[in-house]
Image (spheres, rainbow, N blue to C red):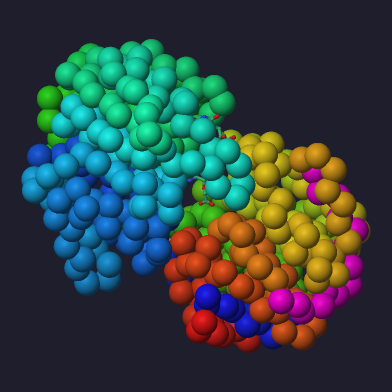
Amino acid sequence: MNRLSIEGGTRLDGQIRISGAKNATLPILAAALLADSPLTVGNVPHLHDVTTTVTLLRRMGVEVTVGERMQLEIDPGTLKECIAPYDLVRTMRASILVLGPLLAHFGEADVSLPGGCAIGSRPVDLHLQGLRAMGADIVVDNGYIQARCGRLRGAQILMSPVSVTGTENLMMAATLAEGETTIENAAREPEVVDLAKCLNQMGAKIEGAGSDLIRITGVKRLGGTHYDVLPDRIETGTYLVAGALTGGHVRLKQTRADMVQSIIEKLQEAGAEITSDQDWIELDMKGRRPLAVSVHTAPYPEFPTDMQAQFTALNAIAKGAGVVTETVFENRFMHVQELARMGADLQLEGNTVFTRGVAGLKGAPVMATDLRASASLVLAGLVAEGETLVDRIYHIDRGYECIEEKLSQLGAHIRRIPA
Ligand code: EPZ
């Protein structure tokens, strides 16, 4: 398997461009299934999860044309079967996002259950409950969700707990349902807002996206459009942390500060000087070692669970004692043991990691287990003495476009070692 080799000790300094958001791209590609004409999507990041989604759409018979700069045109007019098979869904849980659109537009869908993953059991009960409330007949058998319906009916849906893809799936299904649907305790993530903007451009009638109450008035049909996805806020946060924990100075272009306010506040607490404008953010540590911080993950706009592992790496080398509490997923600490092997002083108690910052980490061979845990190991490798070898980096390639090129541009000594 491909590995990343990182020679630690360099203060990052420079600027990079942030890619389009993975977690906006995936639902927007699925939304193409709702339309009667082609949807074109721009600012698409070249990631493994995007490739998997394109493969899934093509497997259904949908024509996907890749243009220059990864612009994708999706034409649902050639769809042949409404099936999302296990061999693809097991590699990417977000495949569940085709369920709502297929049901709403074609009245049928056979989607493999995603199964769990390294960070938790990841059930989809809220997706199924919501679709049943809208009139779908759903049987779960042989590891597949077998769903059938006539035209879906609007319903009042309460999400508990908050679910990002649950909100997105049901919002998409509701766009073509008869009558009005409300989603209470809806996810407020910027990616949900981006999806709603794209759907409204396709002719949907969605109000309230970004708040915890979304109202959708069903329409008869949706048409194609052109939509550019928003910048990736988790990639943005990850490179800000890379600058902070190396005591460096980084400038991130084509991103937005409004989406990462909770991350910026924590980095300022860690001693970073941060400035920003319309489409860039700059972080400067002025060579200082960061101060440890306490973070508590929760649904947007609170501190994102997808940044928890990266801040655990920051706390590992920061001055003082840090506390990181994970409240969204039940097992998102696979990076803790690996960081300990690099010399971090951390104590995992229930859903909280207590750290005592050490002045330096030691490079070591470590193993990636999930997307954001892998990112935290790369970050640790940037400051560790000697070489860090991160194995199983296919996890990283799912969510970070050109990670070694972008880090090298910032001055890191990092290279990919083919298997
Ligand atoms: C989305 O996953 C993101 N993925 C995740 O990003 C992110 O970590 C997560 O939201 C939380 O922000 C995409 O958008 C493709 P949830 P999702 O449904 O929608 C429970 C990354 O690193 N739940 O919001 O699958 C669930 O167990 C990935 O880019 C139910 O109980 O997460 C969890 O505890 C990782 N029943 C909580 O809700 C359901 O039907 C939040 O999960 C659905 C979820």
Asked whether 237 or 125 is in front, the reply is: 125
Whether 130 is drawn above or below 29: the answer is above
Q: Is 324 left, or right, of 55 in this rendering?
A: right
Residue at the image position 47 percent from the left and 36 percent from the top: 164
Tell whether position 353 is magenta: yes
**Which of the 4 image quadrants contains residue 268?**
bottom right
**Which of the 4 image quadrants contains residue 73?**
bottom left
Q: Is 172 left, or right, of 49 in this rendering?
A: left
Residue at the image position 67 percent from the left and 39 percent from the top: 330
What is the x, y in percent for residue 419?
A: 52, 82
Q: How many labels does the image show?
A: 0
Whether 261 is drawn above or below 145: the answer is below
Q: Is 27 left, or right, of 386 in this rendering?
A: left
Whether 22 is drawn above or below 360: the answer is above
Tell whether position 59 is magenta: no
| Residue 54 visible in the picture | yes
Asked whether 268 or 411 is in front, the reply is: 411
- Farthest-out residue, front: 142
| Residue 195 visible in the picture | no
Q: Is 334 left, or right, of 51 in this rendering?
A: right
In magenta, the rendered stretch is 352-365
What is the x, y in percent for residue 52?
A: 34, 58
What is the x, y in percent for residue 402?
A: 46, 74
Asked whether 315 or 418 is in front, the reply is: 418
What is the x, y in percent for residue 225?
A: 17, 47
Residue at the image position 80 percent from the left and 71 percent from the top: 342
Residue at the image position 50 percent from the left and 84 percent from the top: 418
